[in-house]
Image: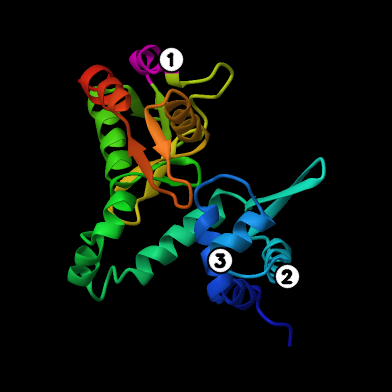
Amino acid sequence: MNEPRLARVAAAIADPTRARVLSRLLDGRLHTAGELAAHAGVTAPTMSAHLKLLVDEGLALVRQQGRHRYFGLADGDVAHALEALLRVADGRDTEPAAAARRWQKPEMRGLRHARSCYGHLAGELGVQWRDSLLAKGWVKVAPDGHYELGDQGRTALAELTPDGISTTGGALYDCVDWSERRDHFAGPLAVAWLSAMVGRGWLSRAKDSRVLTLTPPGRFALFESLLQ
């Protein structure tokens, strides 16, 4: 009898080293095998074997650029599945009080406040961003059940929205936040917004984690100007 694909995928995720790699790739960026080996604390040959398995099982992708190979998550479905597993592992149903205490630990506060989730903004700041855009009416429910920018939103967020990117047709949708247990925005439009925020220096990325730091210019731009 052939092994069920679900069992193979679960086994691929379950290995501690591969789990660390997948968690690292949740930042939405591409990383070299060497970077991932250093992050996971294993040798380059060991990391190559782990990455091959992740690619073979459809959990990761590899992109060749010149002499270099870069690795990332295969797609948004993988990212959402990993976030769901993180919620389960965090004791969502069985120990909510323990999970809440965990997020109050100093080493977790930055991750809870703001982080990247497959290229879009998550954490307290991500939830606040979604709530504010909906409250202002800049983002509205689309006919397909996802979201789209309204006329005011297109004008107000023009600085963050690249030319040519769709603002309708599934470009923006909900993603349950791992730490907050509420929705933040995901999708190509959300990814473009985070990229623009980082590019403008409103948010800065931590070197070895998914943590995002709100800078003084970002605090002014987002909360004293854009969302006031």
Place of residue 160 in the rendered image (x, y in percent of width and height, measured from the top left): 44, 21
Residue under numbered circle 2? 49
Q: Which mark is residue 40?
A: 3
Q: Residue at x 35, y 56 (%)?
A: 178
C-alpha distance separating marks 2 and 3: 13 Å
Quadrant in the picture for residue 54 = bottom right
Quadrant in the picture for residue 98 = bottom left
Q: Are marks 3 and 1 in contact (CB under 8 Å)?
A: no
Q: Residue at x 25, y 66 (%)?
A: 102
Residue 145 seen by the camera: no
**Looking at the image, is 224 positioned above or below residue 183?**
above
Q: Which mark is residue 175?
A: none
Colouring convention used in this rendered image of the protein:
rainbow
Q: Amino acid at mark 3?
A: Ala
Q: Which residues are magenta?
A: 150-159
Place of residue 2 in the rendered image (x, y in percent of width and height, measured from the top left): 73, 83
Q: Amino acid at mark 2?
A: Ala
Q: Residue at x 64, y 76 (%)?
A: 8
| Quarter occupied by the C terminus | top left
Place of residue 143 in the rendered image (x, y in percent of width and height, measured from the top left): 43, 31
| Number of residues whose C-alpha sits closer than 10 Å to that of mark 3, classed few (under 14), some (14–19) or many (20 or more) | some
C-alpha distance separating marks 1 and 2: 44 Å
Residue mark closest to the camera, 2 vs 3: 3
Q: Residue at x 38, y 42 (%)?
A: 212
Q: Amino acid at mark 1?
A: Ala
Name the magenta segment's main secondary structure.
helix
Residue under numbered circle 1? 158
Dot 2 falls on a residue whose secondary structure is: helix
